[in-house]
Amino acid sequence: MTQFSYFTSISEKLINGLRRIQSIALDLSLVPLNDNKQPLGDGWQNRPMKAVELSAAINDGGVEVPIKGEIKKIQLQGIGLLTGRPITKDGQTYYLMALDQDGASAESKILELSAREPLPPTVAFTSGRVGRCQYLFLVPEEYKNAIRTKKVKTGTLGDDGSSEQLEFRWSNLQSVLPPSVHPTTGEYCWVEGCAIDEIEIAIAPPWVIEQMLIDPTPQNDPPYLKLYSQPHKEAMAFKKLGRISILPFPTSTLYLHIALTITTTGLLLAWHFTRLTIPC
């Protein structure tokens, strides 16, 4: 019996999908899934695999996973992407999150929370159900311990009777990637023009990170700021901002960063995303 006897049309589709993932040269953390979107094996959060490893497992008849103290070999039916995991892009470390739009009312909720700003173009995929879509975003490394998964209910019931919601997906979760099997629609697919090898994963918009903050209104200042009142801190900020025009780059960047750090978390967040777009 050759390795090809293990192949099915699903296996061929998954291998092609894994090739597309490999082509983008991002070190994505993946998990094998069954035909009901569930990760295979116990402790799957602690057993991330790479695209090349999953391809090899498919060719070899399945992935070996621990189940109730035994190692079992099971052919995967899907690919899960672990969120909240680090990836390196252009020499910088980011963390991956997924924005899960569960229903048409969740799409409206995105516009409500973003002050009517549309999402930036990014990798996106869907189960094919109406109003269902997930968007991938990169979170700068400095926010990795400051955010968490969050669900926002819309108050609307979907066609299956469950509450529609917007979920900001972070650590210890997985999002099902195309062309994984879906139990009711057949398979997941990429949103047109937004496949993982067609478009880059965008930086998460500021409002997304603000929604995910564990403590959106910090009460404690750094030790060196405890002696200053808020008006005084803001005066210090504007004094430093006033020096920006006479200082050469990158010194001006340093002062801008200091100025916004000593005011509010919101300003620091705004500066971070401004900094990302400054051309070198």
Image (cartoon, rainbow, N blue to C red):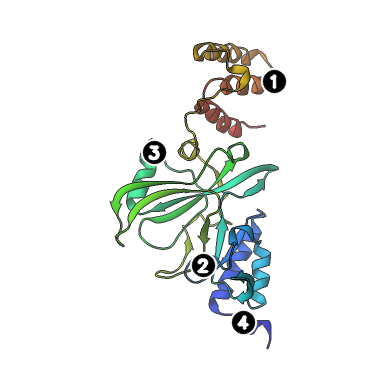
Cα–Cα span, label 4 and label 3: 47 Å
For label 2, the crowd category at 10 Å Cα-Cα, with few meaning under 14, some 14 to 19 and many 20 or more, is many
**Which residue type does callout 3 highlight?**
Leu
State if disc 4 and disc 1 touch (CB < 8 Å).
Answer: no
**According to the image, label 4 marks what residue?**
6
**Which residue type does callout 2 highlight?**
Ser
Residue drawn at 54 percent across, 24 percent down:
220
State if disc 1 and disc 2 touch (CB < 8 Å).
Answer: no
Cα–Cα span, label 1 and label 4: 61 Å
- Image coordinates for residue 135, horizontal then vertical, percent: 48, 51
State if disc 3 and disc 4 touch (CB < 8 Å).
Answer: no
Which of the two labelled residues, at mark 1 and mark 4, occupies the earlier sequence position? 4
**According to the image, label 1 marks what residue?**
251
Is 112 positioned to the left or the right of 34 in the image?
left
Cα–Cα span, label 2 and label 3: 30 Å
Which of the two labelled residues, at mark 3 and mark 1, occupies the earlier sequence position? 3
Cα–Cα span, label 3 and label 1: 35 Å
Which of the two labelled residues, at mark 2 and mark 3, occupies the earlier sequence position? 3
**Which residue type does callout 1 highlight?**
Thr
